[in-house]
Image (tube, grey):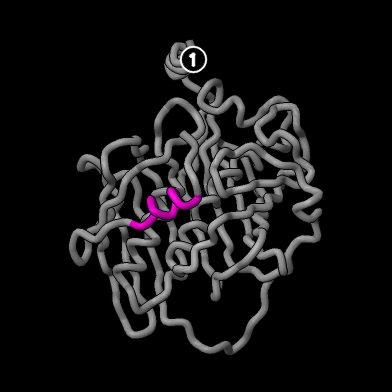
């Protein structure tokens, strides 16, 4: 089954079960047979839960730490612990739980946007436009991904600087602010590990879960008001460090016109597979 952007937005739109509790379906699996929910899907759902908890404010940032994997199937709970709810700023910690076990913790900052005192932003990188970038198979009806100067993002043989520029086009583009921010957050974890591996010959995300153990462990996303766009988005990824089993990636999201609408960072695990894990993965492929 191929999912659509419309399906994805419906998945993000968690249901209220009370003032501080929301539930959502899992729906989407990662790109392998493990049937594990993507961490940034949980992040996106937590952003919507926080927006519904603070309906008079705007979600400005979310920091997620993924403590254990969530499985495709059972519904997920999003329990909001309101730390502070003031006139200008509000903070909540969203506990993401499945079957009574904590899968992730998301700290959310929301505010009432104010007039500018000052304003500036980093310019959009001067890279090839979408028409000159390489189409990349990431099956989802209504989503198109094109990479600049990269043909196969998963290949161990594609070597270059530890940076990846990805053009994304969505249809439909959500007009609800919380869903637009959820959609922005969702892609922040997709290419970070590939970005870190790109600088090293003989290693690529095609090996993930087979010979190399990889997973995003924490993602932070900041939304710069207003978060609106038409046409393409450019996700910039830069791996600033890799070593000791972890990597750090920072990034930005620009509109095609050049407006910076979000910034993000990711901490990811890149470690050798244990022998028992390698045997289990090999058996699963038979």
Relative depth, front residue between 263 and 273: 263
The quadrant holding residue 195 is top right
Give x and y (percent) for residue 143: 58, 48
Relative depth, front residue between 51 and 222: 51
Predominant secondary structure, magenta span:
helix
Work out whether 122 lies above or below 202: below
Residue placed at 53% from the left, 89% from the top? 115
Q: Which residue is mark 1?
A: 285
Work out whether 276 lies above or below 16: above
Report the side of 200 relative to 251 (left or right): right
Tag 1: Cα neighbours inside 10 Å, few (<14), some, or many (≥20)? Answer: few
Q: Residue furthest left?
A: 18
Residue placed at 29% from the left, 69% from the top? 53
Give x and y (percent) for residue 217: 46, 44
The quadrant holding residue 12 is bottom left
Work out whether 41 lies above or below 173: above
Residue placed at 61% from the left, 27% from the top? 206
Relative depth, front residue between 249 and 226: 226
The quadrant holding residue 232 is bottom right
Give x and y (percent) for residue 100: 20, 43
Q: Number of numbered discs present?
A: 1
Residue placed at 46% from the left, 33% from the top? 1
Work out whether 227 lies above or below 267: below
Report the side of 276 relative to 212 (left or right): left
Give x and y (percent) for residue 32: 49, 28
Q: Say which element carries label 1.
A: helix
Q: Give the magenta part as a residue range.
A: 5-13
Report the side of 205 relative to 223 (left or right): right
Report the side of 11 relative to 115 (left or right): left
Residue 33 covered by magenta stretch: no
């Amino acid at each position: 089954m191929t999912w659509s952007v419309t399906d994805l937005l419906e998945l993000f739109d968690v249901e209220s079960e009370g003032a501080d509790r929301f539930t959502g379906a899992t729906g989407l699996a990662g790109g392998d047979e493990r049937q594990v929910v993507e961490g940034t899907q949980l992040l996106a759902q937590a952003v919507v839960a926080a927006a519904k908890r603070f309906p008079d404010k705007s979600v400005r940032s979310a920091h997620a730490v993924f403590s254990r994997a969530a499985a495709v199937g059972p519904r997920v709970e999003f329990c909001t612990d309101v730390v502070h709810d003031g006139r200008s700023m509000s903070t909540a910690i969203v506990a993401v739980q499945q079957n009574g076990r904590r899968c992730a913790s998301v700290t959310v900052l929301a505010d009432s946007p104010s007039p500018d005192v000052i304003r500036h932003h980093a310019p959009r990188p001067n890279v090839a436009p979408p028409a000159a970038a390489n189409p990349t198979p990431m099956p989802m009806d209504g989503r198109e991904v094109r990479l600049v100067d990269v043909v196969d993002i998963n290949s161990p043989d594609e070597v270059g600087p530890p940076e990846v520029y990805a053009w994304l086009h969505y249809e439909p583009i959500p007009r609800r602010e919380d869903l637009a921010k959820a959609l922005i957050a969702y892609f922040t974890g997709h290419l970070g590990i590939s970005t870190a591996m790109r600088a090293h010959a003989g290693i690529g995300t095609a090996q993930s879960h087979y010979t190399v153990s990889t997973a995003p462990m924490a993602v932070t996303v900041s939304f710069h008001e207003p978060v609106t766009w038409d046409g393409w988005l450019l996700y910039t990824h830069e791996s600033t460090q890799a070593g000791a089993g972890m990597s750090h990636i920072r990034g930005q999201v620009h509109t095609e016109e050049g407006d910076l609408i979000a910034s993000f960072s990711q901490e990811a695990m890149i470690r050798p597979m244990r022998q028992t894990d390698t045997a289990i993965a090999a058996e699963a492929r038979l």
